[in-house]
Image (cartoon, rainbow, N blue to C red):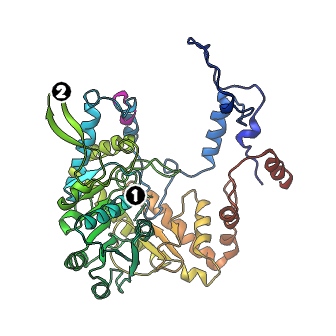
Amino acid sequence: MRTEPLIYELSKPGRRGISVPEPDVPVQEIPANLQRDSLGLPEVSEIDVIRHFTRLSHLNHAIDIDFYPLGSCTMKYNPKINELMSKLPGYGSIHPEQDPATIQGAMELMYELQEMLGEISGFHQVSLQPAAGAHGELTGVLMARAYFEKRGEHQRRTVLVPDSAHGTNPATAAMAGFDVVTVPSDDRGNADVEKLRELVGPDTAALMITNPNTLGLWDESIMEVVDIVHEAGGLVYNDGANFNAILGIARPGDLGIDIMHYNLHKTFSTPHGGGGPGSGPVGVAEHLAEYLPGPRVAKVDNGDVTYDWYQPKHTIGRIHGFHGNFGMHVRAYTYIRMNGAEGLRQISEDAVLAANYMMNKLKDRYTLRYDRTCMHEFVLSANQQKKNGVRALDIAKRLLDFGMHPPTVYFPLVVDEAMMIEPTETESIESLDKFIAAMIQIDEETKTNPDYVNSAPHDTFYKRLDEVGANRNLNLRWTEEKAEELVAAD
Ligand SMILES: *Cc1c(COP(=O)(O)O)cnc(C)c1O
Protein backbone atom coordinates (compact mmCIF):
# COMPACT_ATOMS: atom_id res chain seq x y z
CA MET A 1 0.00 0.00 0.00
CA ARG A 2 2.84 2.42 0.80
CA THR A 3 4.15 4.01 -2.39
CA GLU A 4 5.90 7.14 -1.11
CA PRO A 5 9.62 6.45 -0.76
CA LEU A 6 11.42 7.20 2.47
CA ILE A 7 14.16 9.79 2.17
CA TYR A 8 16.70 7.01 2.78
CA GLU A 9 15.44 5.17 -0.25
CA LEU A 10 16.25 8.20 -2.43
CA SER A 11 19.86 8.08 -1.31
CA LYS A 12 22.58 7.62 -3.97
CA PRO A 13 26.21 7.33 -2.90
CA GLY A 14 28.06 10.62 -3.38
CA ARG A 15 25.01 12.77 -4.13
CA ARG A 16 25.17 16.10 -2.28
CA GLY A 17 22.82 18.96 -1.45
CA ILE A 18 25.48 21.40 -0.35
CA SER A 19 29.13 22.06 -1.04
CA VAL A 20 31.32 23.17 1.84
CA PRO A 21 34.03 25.68 0.86
CA GLU A 22 37.71 24.88 1.39
CA PRO A 23 38.62 25.85 4.97
CA ASP A 24 40.51 29.14 5.38
CA VAL A 25 41.69 28.23 8.88
CA PRO A 26 44.18 25.54 9.93
CA VAL A 27 42.65 22.08 9.71
CA GLN A 28 42.48 20.24 13.05
CA GLU A 29 42.43 16.49 13.33
CA ILE A 30 39.19 15.30 15.01
CA PRO A 31 40.06 13.04 17.98
CA ALA A 32 39.57 9.38 17.03
CA ASN A 33 37.09 8.76 19.88
CA LEU A 34 34.76 11.37 18.36
CA GLN A 35 34.85 9.87 14.88
CA ARG A 36 32.43 7.38 13.35
CA ASP A 37 32.84 5.39 10.18
CA SER A 38 29.34 6.04 9.02
CA LEU A 39 26.57 8.39 10.10
CA GLY A 40 24.03 6.53 7.99
CA LEU A 41 22.60 9.78 6.63
CA PRO A 42 20.83 9.77 3.26
CA GLU A 43 22.89 11.18 0.39
CA VAL A 44 20.52 13.37 -1.58
CA SER A 45 20.53 16.54 -3.66
CA GLU A 46 18.72 19.73 -2.66
CA ILE A 47 15.94 19.14 -5.19
CA ASP A 48 15.46 15.57 -3.92
CA VAL A 49 14.91 16.94 -0.42
CA ILE A 50 12.60 19.76 -1.49
CA ARG A 51 10.43 17.50 -3.65
CA HIS A 52 10.35 14.75 -1.05
CA PHE A 53 9.12 16.94 1.77
CA THR A 54 6.79 18.96 -0.44
CA ARG A 55 5.21 15.70 -1.64
CA LEU A 56 4.86 14.49 1.94
CA SER A 57 3.26 17.77 2.98
CA HIS A 58 0.56 17.17 0.35
CA LEU A 59 -0.37 13.92 2.05
CA ASN A 60 -1.09 15.68 5.28
CA HIS A 61 -3.76 18.05 6.45
CA ALA A 62 -2.95 21.60 7.57
CA ILE A 63 -4.80 24.74 8.58
CA ASP A 64 -3.47 26.33 5.36
CA ILE A 65 -5.28 23.64 3.31
CA ASP A 66 -8.76 23.43 4.81
CA PHE A 67 -10.97 23.45 7.89
CA TYR A 68 -9.40 22.12 11.11
CA PRO A 69 -11.99 22.03 13.94
CA LEU A 70 -9.79 20.21 16.46
CA GLY A 71 -11.51 20.98 19.76
CA SER A 72 -9.46 22.44 22.58
CA CYS A 73 -6.57 23.11 20.19
CA THR A 74 -7.85 26.38 18.67
CA MET A 75 -6.42 25.63 15.24
CA LYS A 76 -6.99 29.08 13.82
CA TYR A 77 -5.38 30.54 10.76
CA ASN A 78 -1.88 31.93 11.39
CA PRO A 79 -1.64 35.32 9.66
CA LYS A 80 1.43 35.45 7.43
CA ILE A 81 2.43 38.87 8.70
CA ASN A 82 3.37 37.17 12.00
CA GLU A 83 5.92 35.10 10.09
CA LEU A 84 7.26 38.13 8.29
CA MET A 85 7.78 40.04 11.52
CA SER A 86 9.46 37.14 13.32
CA LYS A 87 12.07 37.00 10.56
CA LEU A 88 13.11 40.65 10.75
CA PRO A 89 16.88 40.55 11.38
CA GLY A 90 16.53 42.50 14.65
CA TYR A 91 14.35 39.65 15.95
CA GLY A 92 15.42 36.63 13.94
CA SER A 93 19.19 37.05 13.92
CA ILE A 94 20.00 38.03 17.49
CA HIS A 95 21.53 35.83 20.19
CA PRO A 96 20.12 35.49 23.73
CA GLU A 97 23.55 36.04 25.25
CA GLN A 98 24.00 39.43 23.62
CA ASP A 99 24.56 42.45 25.85
CA PRO A 100 21.09 43.86 26.67
CA ALA A 101 22.23 47.25 25.36
CA THR A 102 22.40 45.74 21.86
CA ILE A 103 18.94 44.08 21.90
CA GLN A 104 16.77 46.75 23.47
CA GLY A 105 14.15 46.49 20.71
CA ALA A 106 13.65 42.78 21.25
CA MET A 107 13.51 43.26 25.01
CA GLU A 108 11.00 46.07 24.61
CA LEU A 109 8.82 43.71 22.57
CA MET A 110 9.01 41.08 25.33
CA TYR A 111 8.26 43.67 27.99
CA GLU A 112 5.26 44.97 26.08
CA LEU A 113 3.98 41.46 25.44
CA GLN A 114 4.20 40.73 29.19
CA GLU A 115 2.25 43.92 29.84
CA MET A 116 -0.36 43.31 27.14
CA LEU A 117 -1.03 39.74 28.25
CA GLY A 118 -1.37 41.01 31.82
CA GLU A 119 -3.80 43.71 30.70
CA ILE A 120 -5.93 41.36 28.57
CA SER A 121 -6.31 38.86 31.41
CA GLY A 122 -6.21 41.05 34.52
CA PHE A 123 -2.95 39.71 35.95
CA HIS A 124 -0.25 41.66 37.73
CA GLN A 125 2.82 40.07 36.11
CA VAL A 126 3.55 37.61 33.31
CA SER A 127 6.51 35.36 32.54
CA LEU A 128 7.13 34.43 28.91
CA GLN A 129 9.43 31.49 29.63
CA PRO A 130 7.23 28.37 29.44
CA ALA A 131 7.32 26.61 26.07
CA ALA A 132 3.78 25.21 25.99
CA GLY A 133 0.49 25.09 27.85
CA ALA A 134 1.38 22.05 29.91
CA HIS A 135 4.75 23.63 30.67
CA GLY A 136 2.92 26.75 31.88
CA GLU A 137 0.77 24.55 34.11
CA LEU A 138 3.86 22.96 35.63
CA THR A 139 5.34 26.42 36.19
CA GLY A 140 2.15 27.56 37.92
CA VAL A 141 1.91 24.52 40.17
CA LEU A 142 5.59 24.76 41.13
CA MET A 143 4.98 28.39 42.05
CA ALA A 144 2.05 27.36 44.25
CA ARG A 145 4.30 24.84 45.97
CA ALA A 146 7.05 27.44 46.54
CA TYR A 147 4.45 29.92 47.81
CA PHE A 148 3.12 27.55 50.47
CA GLU A 149 6.60 26.41 51.45
CA LYS A 150 7.60 30.02 52.00
CA ARG A 151 4.52 30.50 54.20
CA GLY A 152 5.28 27.33 56.16
CA GLU A 153 2.02 25.69 55.03
CA HIS A 154 3.66 22.38 54.26
CA GLN A 155 0.46 20.39 54.76
CA ARG A 156 -1.08 21.78 51.53
CA ARG A 157 -0.45 18.71 49.40
CA THR A 158 -3.72 18.35 47.48
CA VAL A 159 -4.75 19.76 44.13
CA LEU A 160 -8.44 19.58 43.22
CA VAL A 161 -9.31 19.12 39.55
CA PRO A 162 -12.85 19.13 38.08
CA ASP A 163 -13.60 16.16 35.83
CA SER A 164 -14.21 18.57 32.92
CA ALA A 165 -10.62 19.84 33.06
CA HIS A 166 -8.09 19.21 30.35
CA GLY A 167 -6.14 15.99 30.91
CA THR A 168 -2.90 17.88 31.37
CA ASN A 169 -4.22 19.47 34.60
CA PRO A 170 -4.26 16.35 36.82
CA ALA A 171 -1.12 15.06 35.08
CA THR A 172 0.73 18.29 35.90
CA ALA A 173 -0.36 18.33 39.52
CA ALA A 174 0.72 14.71 39.97
CA MET A 175 4.04 15.40 38.27
CA ALA A 176 4.71 18.25 40.69
CA GLY A 177 4.19 15.82 43.59
CA PHE A 178 0.66 16.77 44.65
CA ASP A 179 -2.19 14.38 45.45
CA VAL A 180 -4.93 14.85 42.87
CA VAL A 181 -8.60 14.78 43.88
CA THR A 182 -11.35 14.94 41.25
CA VAL A 183 -14.30 17.33 41.59
CA PRO A 184 -17.37 15.98 39.75
CA SER A 185 -19.49 18.08 37.38
CA ASP A 186 -23.09 18.99 38.15
CA ASP A 187 -25.92 18.36 35.70
CA ARG A 188 -25.24 21.61 33.82
CA GLY A 189 -21.58 20.78 33.26
CA ASN A 190 -20.24 23.14 35.95
CA ALA A 191 -17.95 22.11 38.78
CA ASP A 192 -20.26 20.76 41.50
CA VAL A 193 -20.15 23.47 44.17
CA GLU A 194 -21.55 21.32 46.99
CA LYS A 195 -19.01 18.58 46.31
CA LEU A 196 -16.26 21.18 46.15
CA ARG A 197 -17.23 22.47 49.61
CA GLU A 198 -16.84 18.95 50.97
CA LEU A 199 -13.48 18.43 49.30
CA VAL A 200 -11.62 21.63 50.23
CA GLY A 201 -9.73 21.82 53.49
CA PRO A 202 -6.45 22.67 55.19
CA ASP A 203 -4.63 20.27 52.83
CA THR A 204 -5.84 22.12 49.70
CA ALA A 205 -3.02 23.76 47.79
CA ALA A 206 -4.96 24.66 44.69
CA LEU A 207 -7.89 24.05 42.41
CA MET A 208 -6.94 23.67 38.76
CA ILE A 209 -9.95 24.57 36.67
CA THR A 210 -10.29 24.77 32.90
CA ASN A 211 -12.72 27.61 32.24
CA PRO A 212 -14.32 27.61 29.71
CA ASN A 213 -14.06 23.87 30.27
CA THR A 214 -13.43 21.06 27.82
CA LEU A 215 -17.18 20.80 27.17
CA GLY A 216 -16.94 24.35 25.83
CA LEU A 217 -19.01 25.60 28.76
CA TRP A 218 -18.44 28.62 30.94
CA ASP A 219 -18.57 27.67 34.60
CA GLU A 220 -21.65 29.51 35.86
CA SER A 221 -20.48 29.33 39.48
CA ILE A 222 -16.90 30.42 38.88
CA MET A 223 -17.02 33.29 41.40
CA GLU A 224 -18.38 30.98 44.08
CA VAL A 225 -15.83 28.31 43.17
CA VAL A 226 -12.99 30.82 43.57
CA ASP A 227 -14.37 32.01 46.93
CA ILE A 228 -14.70 28.48 48.29
CA VAL A 229 -11.07 27.67 47.47
CA HIS A 230 -9.78 30.99 48.79
CA GLU A 231 -11.72 30.64 52.04
CA ALA A 232 -9.98 27.30 52.53
CA GLY A 233 -6.62 29.06 52.01
CA GLY A 234 -5.92 27.53 48.58
CA LEU A 235 -5.00 29.10 45.26
CA VAL A 236 -7.01 28.93 42.03
CA TYR A 237 -5.24 28.00 38.81
CA ASN A 238 -7.14 28.63 35.59
CA ASP A 239 -6.11 26.70 32.51
CA GLY A 240 -6.24 29.54 30.00
CA ALA A 241 -5.85 27.48 26.85
CA ASN A 242 -9.49 28.22 26.08
CA PHE A 243 -8.95 31.98 26.37
CA ASN A 244 -10.12 32.40 22.76
CA ALA A 245 -13.70 32.44 24.06
CA ILE A 246 -13.43 35.44 26.37
CA LEU A 247 -10.89 37.95 24.99
CA GLY A 248 -12.03 41.46 25.80
CA ILE A 249 -15.14 40.09 27.55
CA ALA A 250 -13.96 38.63 30.88
CA ARG A 251 -10.60 38.86 32.65
CA PRO A 252 -9.71 35.83 34.80
CA GLY A 253 -7.66 38.07 37.11
CA ASP A 254 -10.81 40.08 37.88
CA LEU A 255 -12.60 36.87 38.85
CA GLY A 256 -10.02 36.26 41.58
CA ILE A 257 -7.97 33.66 39.72
CA ASP A 258 -4.40 33.55 41.09
CA ILE A 259 -2.50 31.89 38.23
CA MET A 260 -3.22 31.22 34.56
CA HIS A 261 -1.29 30.10 31.53
CA TYR A 262 -1.92 31.33 28.00
CA ASN A 263 -1.35 29.31 24.87
CA LEU A 264 0.17 31.78 22.41
CA HIS A 265 0.03 28.93 19.90
CA LYS A 266 -3.74 28.76 20.24
CA THR A 267 -5.37 32.04 21.21
CA PHE A 268 -2.73 34.31 19.75
CA SER A 269 -2.36 32.57 16.39
CA THR A 270 1.24 31.41 16.57
CA PRO A 271 1.45 28.15 14.60
CA HIS A 272 1.27 24.70 16.14
CA GLY A 273 0.78 21.10 15.21
CA GLY A 274 3.75 19.05 14.17
CA GLY A 275 5.44 19.48 17.51
CA GLY A 276 5.95 23.16 18.05
CA PRO A 277 7.68 25.22 19.20
CA GLY A 278 4.86 26.61 21.30
CA SER A 279 4.70 29.24 23.99
CA GLY A 280 2.76 29.07 27.26
CA PRO A 281 3.34 32.25 29.30
CA VAL A 282 2.05 32.38 32.87
CA GLY A 283 0.22 35.30 34.47
CA VAL A 284 -0.16 35.76 38.21
CA ALA A 285 -1.85 37.95 40.77
CA GLU A 286 0.33 40.32 42.81
CA HIS A 287 1.00 37.98 45.76
CA LEU A 288 2.69 35.48 43.44
CA ALA A 289 4.69 37.86 41.23
CA GLU A 290 7.98 37.32 43.06
CA TYR A 291 7.76 33.55 42.49
CA LEU A 292 7.72 33.76 38.70
CA PRO A 293 10.50 32.08 36.75
CA GLY A 294 13.33 34.40 35.95
CA PRO A 295 14.92 36.25 34.42
CA ARG A 296 12.03 38.40 33.24
CA VAL A 297 12.23 41.69 31.40
CA ALA A 298 11.91 44.76 33.59
CA LYS A 299 11.78 48.43 32.67
CA VAL A 300 14.70 50.25 34.30
CA ASP A 301 16.29 53.65 34.08
CA ASN A 302 19.88 52.86 33.49
CA GLY A 303 21.59 55.11 30.95
CA ASP A 304 21.45 53.43 27.55
CA VAL A 305 19.46 50.48 28.89
CA THR A 306 15.70 50.89 29.38
CA TYR A 307 14.94 47.15 29.50
CA ASP A 308 16.99 44.72 31.55
CA TRP A 309 16.80 41.17 32.90
CA TYR A 310 15.26 40.94 36.32
CA GLN A 311 15.30 38.04 38.80
CA PRO A 312 12.14 37.86 40.97
CA LYS A 313 12.96 37.63 44.69
CA HIS A 314 11.57 34.13 45.42
CA THR A 315 11.81 32.89 41.85
CA ILE A 316 11.29 29.18 41.23
CA GLY A 317 14.24 29.56 38.85
CA ARG A 318 14.55 28.94 35.16
CA ILE A 319 12.12 26.65 33.43
CA HIS A 320 13.46 27.22 29.90
CA GLY A 321 16.85 27.78 28.30
CA PHE A 322 17.35 31.52 27.90
CA HIS A 323 14.06 33.42 27.62
CA GLY A 324 11.45 31.12 26.10
CA ASN A 325 10.57 30.72 22.42
CA PHE A 326 11.20 34.29 21.35
CA GLY A 327 9.98 33.80 17.76
CA MET A 328 6.56 32.98 19.21
CA HIS A 329 6.63 36.14 21.29
CA VAL A 330 7.12 38.20 18.12
CA ARG A 331 4.24 36.42 16.36
CA ALA A 332 1.83 36.85 19.30
CA TYR A 333 2.86 40.48 19.76
CA THR A 334 2.20 41.12 16.07
CA TYR A 335 -1.21 39.45 16.30
CA ILE A 336 -2.26 41.51 19.32
CA ARG A 337 -1.07 44.76 17.74
CA MET A 338 -2.71 43.96 14.40
CA ASN A 339 -6.07 43.34 16.09
CA GLY A 340 -6.06 45.90 18.87
CA ALA A 341 -8.41 45.79 21.86
CA GLU A 342 -11.61 45.89 19.79
CA GLY A 343 -10.31 43.32 17.34
CA LEU A 344 -9.54 40.90 20.15
CA ARG A 345 -13.08 41.15 21.49
CA GLN A 346 -14.45 40.59 17.99
CA ILE A 347 -12.30 37.45 17.71
CA SER A 348 -13.98 35.92 20.73
CA GLU A 349 -17.46 37.02 19.71
CA ASP A 350 -17.00 35.46 16.28
CA ALA A 351 -15.48 32.26 17.69
CA VAL A 352 -18.44 31.83 20.06
CA LEU A 353 -20.93 32.67 17.32
CA ALA A 354 -19.40 30.14 14.92
CA ALA A 355 -19.50 27.39 17.55
CA ASN A 356 -23.13 28.09 18.52
CA TYR A 357 -24.20 28.22 14.86
CA MET A 358 -22.70 24.83 14.20
CA MET A 359 -23.95 23.31 17.44
CA ASN A 360 -27.52 24.34 16.68
CA LYS A 361 -27.33 23.03 13.11
CA LEU A 362 -26.07 19.63 14.29
CA LYS A 363 -27.83 18.96 17.57
CA ASP A 364 -30.82 17.29 15.90
CA ARG A 365 -28.48 14.73 14.31
CA TYR A 366 -25.99 14.11 17.09
CA THR A 367 -26.59 14.04 20.84
CA LEU A 368 -25.72 17.22 22.66
CA ARG A 369 -24.96 16.22 26.24
CA TYR A 370 -25.40 19.69 27.76
CA ASP A 371 -27.93 21.73 25.78
CA ARG A 372 -26.66 25.17 26.76
CA THR A 373 -25.20 28.12 24.90
CA CYS A 374 -21.61 27.09 24.31
CA MET A 375 -18.44 29.13 24.21
CA HIS A 376 -15.75 28.62 21.55
CA GLU A 377 -16.38 24.87 21.17
CA PHE A 378 -19.01 22.22 21.81
CA VAL A 379 -19.11 18.48 22.36
CA LEU A 380 -21.41 16.12 20.49
CA SER A 381 -21.86 12.43 21.13
CA ALA A 382 -22.10 9.78 18.42
CA ASN A 383 -24.10 7.50 20.74
CA GLN A 384 -27.09 7.40 18.34
CA GLN A 385 -24.82 6.50 15.40
CA LYS A 386 -23.18 3.85 17.55
CA LYS A 387 -26.46 1.89 17.51
CA ASN A 388 -25.85 1.41 13.78
CA GLY A 389 -22.29 0.35 14.45
CA VAL A 390 -20.71 3.68 13.55
CA ARG A 391 -18.47 5.19 16.17
CA ALA A 392 -16.92 8.62 16.66
CA LEU A 393 -13.64 7.36 15.21
CA ASP A 394 -15.40 6.21 12.03
CA ILE A 395 -17.05 9.61 11.60
CA ALA A 396 -13.66 11.26 12.10
CA LYS A 397 -12.14 9.05 9.39
CA ARG A 398 -15.02 9.70 6.99
CA LEU A 399 -14.57 13.47 7.37
CA LEU A 400 -11.11 13.11 5.83
CA ASP A 401 -12.82 12.21 2.55
CA PHE A 402 -14.39 15.67 2.57
CA GLY A 403 -10.95 17.27 2.79
CA MET A 404 -11.45 18.45 6.35
CA HIS A 405 -9.63 17.60 9.54
CA PRO A 406 -11.78 15.70 12.05
CA PRO A 407 -12.64 17.13 15.45
CA THR A 408 -11.04 15.79 18.62
CA VAL A 409 -12.67 12.44 19.44
CA TYR A 410 -13.10 10.51 22.71
CA PHE A 411 -12.35 13.61 24.76
CA PRO A 412 -13.59 14.85 27.17
CA LEU A 413 -13.97 11.49 28.89
CA VAL A 414 -17.24 12.55 30.57
CA VAL A 415 -19.07 12.22 27.21
CA ASP A 416 -19.55 8.83 25.52
CA GLU A 417 -18.33 8.76 21.88
CA ALA A 418 -17.33 12.41 22.21
CA MET A 419 -16.60 14.70 19.27
CA MET A 420 -15.23 18.04 20.38
CA ILE A 421 -15.69 20.66 17.68
CA GLU A 422 -14.01 24.07 17.63
CA PRO A 423 -14.56 25.99 14.39
CA THR A 424 -12.68 29.18 15.46
CA GLU A 425 -13.42 32.70 14.25
CA THR A 426 -11.26 32.48 11.16
CA GLU A 427 -13.67 30.32 9.14
CA SER A 428 -16.18 31.77 6.70
CA ILE A 429 -19.87 30.84 6.82
CA GLU A 430 -19.23 28.74 3.69
CA SER A 431 -16.68 26.53 5.41
CA LEU A 432 -18.92 26.18 8.48
CA ASP A 433 -21.79 25.12 6.19
CA LYS A 434 -19.55 22.70 4.32
CA PHE A 435 -18.67 20.94 7.58
CA ILE A 436 -22.31 20.90 8.71
CA ALA A 437 -23.35 19.38 5.37
CA ALA A 438 -20.63 16.72 5.65
CA MET A 439 -21.73 15.79 9.17
CA ILE A 440 -25.36 15.52 8.02
CA GLN A 441 -24.38 13.37 5.05
CA ILE A 442 -22.35 11.08 7.32
CA ASP A 443 -25.32 10.72 9.64
CA GLU A 444 -27.45 9.69 6.63
CA GLU A 445 -24.78 7.18 5.63
CA THR A 446 -24.78 5.61 9.08
CA LYS A 447 -28.42 4.69 8.40
CA THR A 448 -28.11 3.64 4.76
CA ASN A 449 -24.55 2.38 4.38
CA PRO A 450 -22.73 2.11 7.71
CA ASP A 451 -20.01 -0.11 6.23
CA TYR A 452 -18.96 2.71 3.98
CA VAL A 453 -18.42 4.98 7.00
CA ASN A 454 -16.69 2.20 8.92
CA SER A 455 -14.18 1.61 6.14
CA ALA A 456 -13.38 5.31 5.57
CA PRO A 457 -11.31 7.13 4.53
CA HIS A 458 -11.73 6.21 0.86
CA ASP A 459 -10.23 9.22 -0.94
CA THR A 460 -7.02 9.82 0.96
CA PHE A 461 -3.57 8.60 -0.03
CA TYR A 462 -3.30 6.45 3.06
CA LYS A 463 -6.39 4.52 4.06
CA ARG A 464 -7.23 3.48 7.60
CA LEU A 465 -4.08 2.90 9.60
CA ASP A 466 -3.40 0.36 12.29
CA GLU A 467 -3.45 2.87 15.12
CA VAL A 468 -3.21 0.34 17.90
CA GLY A 469 -0.13 -1.19 16.26
CA ALA A 470 1.35 2.26 15.70
CA ASN A 471 0.93 3.06 19.39
CA ARG A 472 2.05 -0.27 20.79
CA ASN A 473 4.96 -0.91 18.43
CA LEU A 474 6.06 2.58 17.51
CA ASN A 475 9.27 2.33 15.54
CA LEU A 476 10.65 5.47 13.99
CA ARG A 477 14.07 4.10 13.13
CA TRP A 478 14.74 3.31 9.49
CA THR A 479 16.81 0.27 8.69
CA GLU A 480 17.51 -1.32 5.35
CA GLU A 481 15.99 -4.58 6.58
CA LYS A 482 12.82 -2.77 7.62
CA ALA A 483 12.55 -1.12 4.20
CA GLU A 484 12.91 -4.47 2.47
CA GLU A 485 10.23 -5.91 4.73
CA LEU A 486 7.85 -3.11 3.76
CA VAL A 487 8.53 -3.53 0.05
CA ALA A 488 8.01 -7.27 0.36
CA ALA A 489 4.70 -6.71 2.18
CA ASP A 490 3.35 -4.41 -0.56
C1 LIG B 1 -3.90 22.51 24.55
C2 LIG B 1 -4.36 22.54 25.93
C3 LIG B 1 -3.46 22.36 27.00
C4 LIG B 1 -2.01 21.98 26.81
O1 LIG B 1 -1.30 22.89 26.03
P1 LIG B 1 0.00 22.43 25.23
O2 LIG B 1 0.53 23.68 24.64
O3 LIG B 1 -0.47 21.44 24.22
O4 LIG B 1 0.94 21.82 26.22
C5 LIG B 1 -3.94 22.47 28.28
N1 LIG B 1 -5.23 22.73 28.52
C6 LIG B 1 -6.13 22.91 27.51
C7 LIG B 1 -7.57 23.23 27.85
C8 LIG B 1 -5.72 22.82 26.19
O5 LIG B 1 -6.61 22.99 25.22
Q: Between 168 and 382, which is closer to the camera in this rendering?
A: 168
User: Is the residue at mark 2 in contact range of ligand 1, meaning its CB lies under 8 Å from it?
Assistant: no
Say few, some or many: other residues with alpha carbon within 10 Å of mark 1 (under 14 / 14 to 19 / 20 or more): many
Q: Between 156 and 322, which is closer to the camera in this rendering?
A: 156
Q: On the picture, is 219 further left or further right than 365? A: left
Above or below, comparing residue 202 to residue 481 in the picture: below
Question: Residue under circle 2?
Answer: 304
Amino acid at pointer 2 = Asp
Query: Residue at position x 75%, y 32% from top?
Result: 37
Q: Position of residue 152 (x, y in %)?
A: 24, 69
Q: On the picture, is 51 further left or further right than 97? A: right
Q: Position of residue 448 (x, y in %)?
A: 65, 78
Question: Residue under circle 1?
Answer: 133
Mark 1 or 2 closer to N-term? 1
Q: Position of residue 157 (x, y in %)?
A: 34, 74
Q: Residue furthest right?
A: 488
User: Is residue 422 covered in magenta?
Assistant: no
Amino acid at pointer 1 = Gly
Q: On the picture, is 17 further left or further right than 93? A: right
Do the CB atoms of the residues marked 1 and 2 lie less than 8 Å apart? no
